[in-house]
Image (cartoon, grey):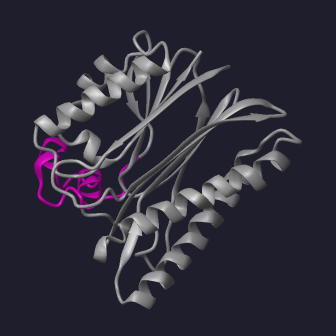
Amino acid sequence: MNFIVSGNTDIGLTKSTNQDSLSIKVINTKQGRMVLAVLCDGMGGLDKGEVASASVIRAFDNWAKNDLPALCEAPIEDPIIRSQWENIITEQNNKIKAYGGGLGIKLGTTVTAMLLTQTRYYIINVGDTRAYELYNGIRQITNDQTFVAREVALGNMTEEQALTDERRSVLLQCVGASDEVYPDMFFGDIKENAVYMLCCDGFRHEISPEEIYERFHPDKLLDEHKMNQASLELIELNKQRQERDNITVALIRTF
């Protein structure tokens, strides 16, 4: 399995800072090439959301540098990834919470991190950044940890109502602003000639899954230039439709 990667972010129309943070890297290991992609959507007073999101990005980058090589000495097991990544989230929650307490503000960040190996994907998620698989159609892998997603799951709201509800961005938890954080984990076998996508909520509010699949179809994203071009086109479409948030998307094409 091989990979082409692309990442793009935009401050958007109204924000004074870009509080999203993104890291995407191809890593050579003893078990072949891998990709680690991490996307965080920060929020907080005094525009400190970017501090929270950047802190979580650094923590996962450090894991890739310091811990992943040792894991690759033997077959990687799902429970080991779960344990190490949950520890990262707990440590970051405590660190960011303490930092905010020292300033007298609350700040935090969502996080979606994905590791693609030669055969398998590993994803951890807190908040409403998302991971998708685009193959024969578009499939959302992660579940939003939001008020409206919970209401839909409980049958109190339809998906159509959730799309326009004024509480659609209300998070049930985020890293740095919750007493304790309970991340979701997702595992699965990766597909060849597929596209894996991470995006913040600002990327998907004003465009449909069908529009995403049409622009990001695996048959169209054959090199990094085409991936960047398609990403920038959808970012601009979001802005044309008056998306007010920061807009960030990461793409991994397998072949």
Above or below — where is 151 with respect to 217? Answer: below
Q: Nearer the viewer, residue 172 or 193?
A: 193
Quarter of the picture containing the N terminus is top right
Q: Where is residue 240 in the image (x, y as percent from the top left)?
A: 12, 35
Please state if 143 lies on the left or on the right of 167 as rendered: right
What is the span of residues highlighted in magenta in the rendered image? 143-169
161 is within the stretch colored magenta: yes
Q: Nearer the viewer, residue 186 or 44?
A: 44
Q: In which quarter of the image is residue 243?
A: top left
Above or below — where is 9 with respect to 18? Answer: above
Please state if 142 lies on the left or on the right of 190 as rendered: left
Residue beneath the point at 25% across and 63% down: 170
**Residue 3 shows in this picture:** yes
Quarter of the picture containing the C terminus is top right
Q: Where is residue 210 in the image (x, y as percent from the top left)?
A: 25, 23
Q: Where is residue 92 in the image (x, y as percent from the top left)?
A: 56, 70
Residue beneath the point at 40% across and 63% down: 50
